[in-house]
Image (spheres, rainbow, N blue to C red):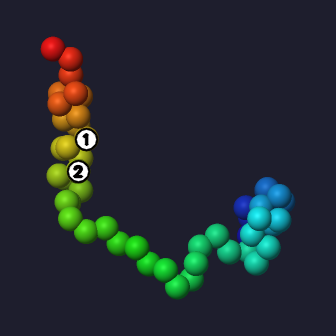
Amino acid sequence: YLLFRICPDLRKRYPNGHFWNAGYFCCSVGAEFKQVFTYIENQSLHHATQ
């Protein structure tokens, strides 16, 4: 792995050469991208001081 060549100290923390667990999957459910984007854009309006 290129990252282990660039940062050799990572080999001490990850001696098997794996960053992620091979048997774990996570998926988000709920709001779509457009809804989340709109929510983030409007945060400045929501938290504005009056």
- Taking the spot 59% from the left edge, 73% from the top edge, the residue there is 20
- Residue named by callout 1: 40
Q: What whole-number distance in Å separates the C-alpha atoms at marks 1 and 2?
A: 6 Å
- Residue named by callout 2: 36
Residue 36 versus residue 11 in the image, above or below? above
- Taking the spot 76% from the left edge, 78% from the top edge, the residue there is 16
- Taking the spot 15% from the left edge, 14% from the top edge, the residue there is 50
Residue 45 versus residue 22 in the image, above or below? above
- Viewport quadrant of the N terminus: bottom right
| Residue 44: percent from left, percent from top | 23, 28
| Residue 19: percent from left, percent from top | 64, 70
| Residue 29: percent from left, percent from top | 25, 68
- Say which of 9 and 33 sits in front: 9
Mark 1 element type: helix
Where, by quadrant of the figure, is residue 43 drawn? top left
| Residue 46: percent from left, percent from top | 17, 30
